[in-house]
Image (cartoon, helix red, strand yellow):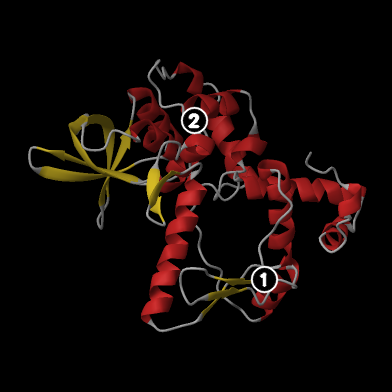
Amino acid sequence: MIEYIKGNLTDLTPTYAVIEAAGVGYAINIALPTYSALVGKENSETKLFVTEIIREDTHDLFGFFTRGERELFLMLMTVSGIGANTARMIMSAYSASEIRQIIATGNARALSQVKGLGPKTAQRIIVDLKDKVLKIDLGSEASQGSLEDAASGYSLEVNGKETKAKHPCFLCSWYRRKALFDVAQELGCNKIALGHHKDDLIETLLMNLIFQGSVSTIPPLLQMEKMPLQMIRPLCLIEEKDIATYAEMSRYEKQLKLCPLEKVSSRAQVKGLLSQLEELNPNVRDSIWGAMENIKVDYLPKKV
């Protein structure tokens, strides 16, 4: 059994770290709080407590900043239906101290927000671990970073300039989009069609209002400035539920998403907010959509 690995941190992503020790590079699966604790420590000596998951077809290492986090991870895996990947998603959705508090207080609703966990599984975790979880000593050095700051301090180059990533979603979006651009140019394409729907545009408008202080959303047509490419969104007038119905009727296979942020991101929060607003006004989505075409500039404050 390996207790910990100590060596030079040669590679770091939100899902794994590579530590070189005695000439061997160990690829270690990590959760987002551990990633947050390691940001800025690349090419320096790092120590992770590890546990091994060995099966017939795989031999995986999972790393943690403290022994307490590792103990919590192993405890989660004692619950029926919780494997290593699901346990890591839980530990990516919340810090170790938050998970301990959620389980100890019986907050099944918070647990069920984690991708892959339904209400029944969340309740099972609470029943099995409620009396055990408070015995875990997380220590004072626990990596308490949450999803919101997991990418804080992480930098990447955008248009030749280094910029700080504010959120792991920014990193993911940037690299996915960059990959699309590279392939499109290699194939000689002049347009990229994206699948954003009407609800995406409404949610983005609210997100920009709430978090950015701006009135803007995703443009249906966008000409890229530095490359001969147009971004088009042909589904932008179609509601999400209609697309889901058509996909089901056509028996399209649903894409498996492994992102632990899917249910706890700002967009997920805005989706929840829209559902609450619909209780006040069932037509609130139509109202918000219409507001984008009905901006009365004369009735808005002006800069002095």
Compared across the picture, whether 266 is left or right of 284 comes to: left
Compared across the picture, whether 58 is left or right of 186 comes to: left
Which residue is nearer to you in this view: 51 or 15?
Answer: 15
The label on residue 95 is: 2
Which secondary structure, mark 2?
Answer: loop
Label 2 amino acid? Ser
Q: Is residue 14 among the parts visible in the rendering? A: no
Which secondary structure, mark 1?
Answer: loop
Q: Is residue 209 among the parts visible in the rendering? A: yes
Residue 245, image x, y percentages:
72, 73
Disc 2 or disc 1, which is closer to the eye?
1
* Residue visible at 62% across and 42% down in the picture: 112
The label on residue 220 is: 1
Seen in the picture, residue 240 relative to 269 is either above or below; the reply is below
Residue 164, image x, y percentages:
44, 42
In the rendered structure, which disc, 2 or 1, sits on the residue that comes first in sequence?
Answer: 2
Work out how far the residue at label 2 is from the one at label 1, CA to CA, in angstroms. 38 Å
